[in-house]
Amino acid sequence: MKQNIWLIALGAAIALSSIAFPFIIGNIVTKYNTTETIDYSLVFLAGIAIITTPSLRFIANLTVQKYNAKTRTLNKKSVILNIIDPKAKSISPGRAIDLVDGDTDGTIYLFHGIYLDITSNFALLILAFSVILYNYPVYAIPPAVAITYSLITQHLHHKKLPKLFDHYIEQNTMHLESVCSGLNSNRDFRYVLQSTARKRLLKTCIKSNFKLSVLEFSSSLSYLLGLVTLILLYTHVVNHDSYSTGAFISAALYVEKVLVPVFGLISIYYSTAESQSRKKRIDKNTGLTSK
């Protein structure tokens, strides 16, 4: 848990450094339009902000990889010990291989990486939306539309997602079981058997990922919806001269800062579907729970 607290702190720092850039750029443009001079101190600060964000992200990614390596080893050891426990329910060699290798590797993102990604995206979303709401209230409409659309589509899809990969994962395990059981069988028979199993597995994999892509695409339309709303809104604002050019640039950049994490959170939600299914199966077959 201490490791994830450090990742949460890094995620918040990434969001804070990222949010400074639009404000500085907006001030540079506004001052130039007013005085026709460039404030080089602001340009310097903008450069610092540009450098800081990817640097923090690089450090955070290295930290995640370090934590993942330790956790992966511990998880595999725990699963192996649970499987070989005389009191544990006996499972086939193929299922044991998939639990130790496929499931533990497939769920590793849920232990550390997800904390960093959710924190950085959610913090950036809140900070950017707060700035827009305080300084440019009218430009809060596009991100609000995008967020509302995302929540609605998520609600409509939330019952379909949990079981989306269950059948594919089980088919993969059955394939490994057939490989292990057929190692000593006739070579020609084993080849035909595995060829059929691979085709069945590929079909299930394509079907699961296609359904996931459709669900993710429908939710990701929130990004396009937000941009279209921003363009329509800008046309109205320009006609009424409500904001300066610098103010619009700042607002537009902040709207982008909201739409990007919304898209990021949507991607996290859908990309972890298989990991969630594998985690559920680990708990069911070994009785282990994430720590």
Image (cartoon, grey):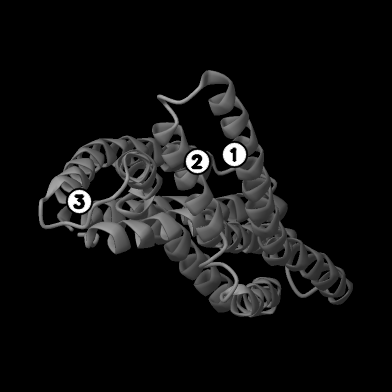
Kindly identify which numbered label has been placed on residue 3: 3
First in sequence: mark 2 vs mark 3: 3
Q: Of 288 and 247, which appears nearest the observer?
A: 288
| Quadrant hosting residue 68 | top left
Q: Of 142 and 245, which appears nearest the observer?
A: 142
> How many marks overall?
3
Can you say which quadrant of the picture contains the C terminus? Answer: bottom left
Q: What residue do we see at 63% from left, 54% from top?
A: 208
Secondary structure under tag 3 reads helix
> x%, y% of residue 204?
64, 50
Furthest residue toward top: 187
Secondary structure under tag 2 reads helix
Distance between the alpha carbons at the discs numbered 2 and 3: 36 Å
For label 1, the crowd category at 10 Å Cα-Cα, with few meaning under 14, some 14 to 19 and many 20 or more, is some
Residue 154 lies left or right of residue 117; in this view the side is right
Q: Which residue is identified by label 1?
A: 197
First in sequence: mark 3 vs mark 1: 3
Q: Which residue is identified by label 2?
A: 175
Distance between the alpha carbons at the discs numbered 3 and 1: 41 Å
> x%, y% of residue 161?
56, 67
Can you say which quadrant of the picture contains the N terminus? Answer: bottom left
